[in-house]
């Protein structure tokens, strides 16, 4: 995840906030991610940014009618045609949505 941020910025910079979107099927827990993230961020030169999580829904596509909607509960039927034959489009992601760079220049650097 930090590699993604690093690539986006070019070089490590002090960040004030990192927004991460997490799908319910990603198996990533925000708590453990926060716990792991803090020491890695400091070591990588990103400072101590605030981690903000945006939970994403599970989007499914119906095989019968082609309708795309958010799956409210596992195994729920299509709201248009009632089919249960649907494939999951998203919900497994764990991606960095945006980063905020700290503007303040630190003295002595
Ligand atoms: Zn349908």
Image: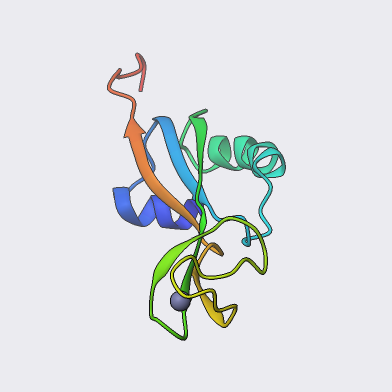
Number of marks: 0
Using residue 50 as the reference point, say whether residue 100 is left or right of it.
left
Provide residue 109's location: percent of width, then percent of height: 35, 23
Provide residue 95's location: percent of width, then percent of height: 46, 55
Residue 22 in the image: above or below residue 92: above
* Viewer-closest of 85 and 92: 85
Residue drawn at 53 percent across, 79 percent down: 87
Using residue 12 as the reference point, say whether residue 105 is left or right of it.
left
Residue drawn at 48 percent across, 45 percent down: 20
Provide residue 40's location: percent of width, then percent of height: 60, 43
Tell me where residue 32 sits by quadrant.
top right
* Viewer-closest of 92 and 100: 92
Tell me where residue 34 sits by quadrant.
top right
Residue drawn at 55 percent across, 35 percent down: 42
Provide residue 89's location: percent of width, then percent of height: 47, 72
In this picture the colour scheme is rainbow
* Viewer-closest of 108 and 66: 66
* Viewer-closest of 35 and 44: 35
Residue drawn at 58 percent across, 69 percent down: 77
| Residue farthest along the front direction in this orientation | 81
| Residue farthest along the top direction in this orientation | 107
């Amino acid at each position: 995840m930090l590699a993604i941020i690093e690539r986006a910025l070019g070089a490590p910079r002090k960040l004030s906030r990192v927004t991460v979107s997490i799908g319910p099927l990603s198996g990533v827990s925000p708590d453990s991610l926060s716990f792991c993230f803090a020491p890695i961020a400091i070591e990588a030169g990103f400072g101590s940014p605030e981690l903000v999580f945006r939970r994403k829904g599970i989007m499914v596509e119906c095989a019968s009618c082609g309708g795309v909607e958010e799956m409210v509960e596992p195994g729920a039927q299509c709201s248009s045609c009632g089919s249960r034959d649907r494939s999951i489009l998203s919900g497994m992601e764990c991606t960095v949505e945006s980063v905020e760079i700290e503007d303040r220049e630190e003295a002595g650097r």
